[in-house]
Amino acid sequence: MAVVACNDEDVKLLARLMRAEAEGDGRLGMLMVGNVGVNRVIANCLDFQGLRSIRQMVFQSPGGFEAIQKGYFYQRARDIDIGLARQVIRGWRYHPATNSLWFFKPAGDCPAQWFNQWNAGRYKSHCFYAPSQNECPRVY
């Protein structure tokens, strides 16, 4: 059962985003990016109020993903990427992205805070940041 409403095109869109943002971090890194995306659709808080669909989340501006500005994002979704997207849409969560709404790739260590959000952990090249449960209860 999906935790966010979606159709086949939404699944492919999320799959392309996950690949473009984190292919270098492998399947688990891509799954974590997918967690962040799904969390943004669910959250309805902070920078993500009013997002109701995967499409709105992917193309959110300002505050969206850098990958959509690069040609790599616009390649066809591969079957493996679609399968990974389906996992996160079904609610599978992976630490440290479990409740995260943000991630970024720093040049060095992960800062303890990023835009006033606490670091939830690092996976390979990306640091993940989660809001408090009081700020965004729907992602918990």
Image (tube, rainbow, N blue to C red):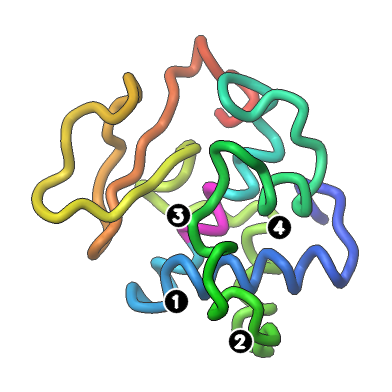
Closer to the N terminus: mark 2 or mark 1? 1
Q: Split into 4 quadrants, where in the image is the C terminus?
A: top right
Observer-nearest of 90 and 59 = 59
Q: Split into 4 quadrants, where in the image is the N terminus?
A: bottom right
When asked about the image quadrant of residue 44, the answer is top right
**4 and 3 marks in contact (CB < 8 Å):** no
Q: Amino acid at mark 1?
A: Arg
When asked about the image quadrant of residue 124, the answer is bottom left
The residue to which callout 1 is attached is 27
Closer to the N terminus: mark 2 or mark 3? 2
**Residue at image x 27%, y 34%?**
119
The residue to which callout 4 is attached is 89
> Tag 1: Cα neighbours inside 10 Å, few (<14), some, or many (≥20)?
some
Q: CA distance from mark 4 to mark 3?
A: 12 Å
Q: Secondary structure at mark 2?
A: helix
Closer to the N terminus: mark 4 or mark 3? 4
Q: CA distance from mark 1 to mark 3?
A: 11 Å
Magenta stretch: give its range: 32-36
Q: Amino acid at mark 3?
A: Tyr
Q: Is residue 17 left or right of residue 3?
A: left
**2 and 4 marks in contact (CB < 8 Å):** no
Q: Secondary structure at mark 1?
A: helix
The residue to which callout 2 is attached is 80
Q: Is residue 21 left or right of residue 81?
A: left
Q: Which mark is residue 96?
A: none
Front of the two marks 1 and 3: 1
Q: Amino acid at mark 4?
A: Ile
The residue to which callout 3 is attached is 94
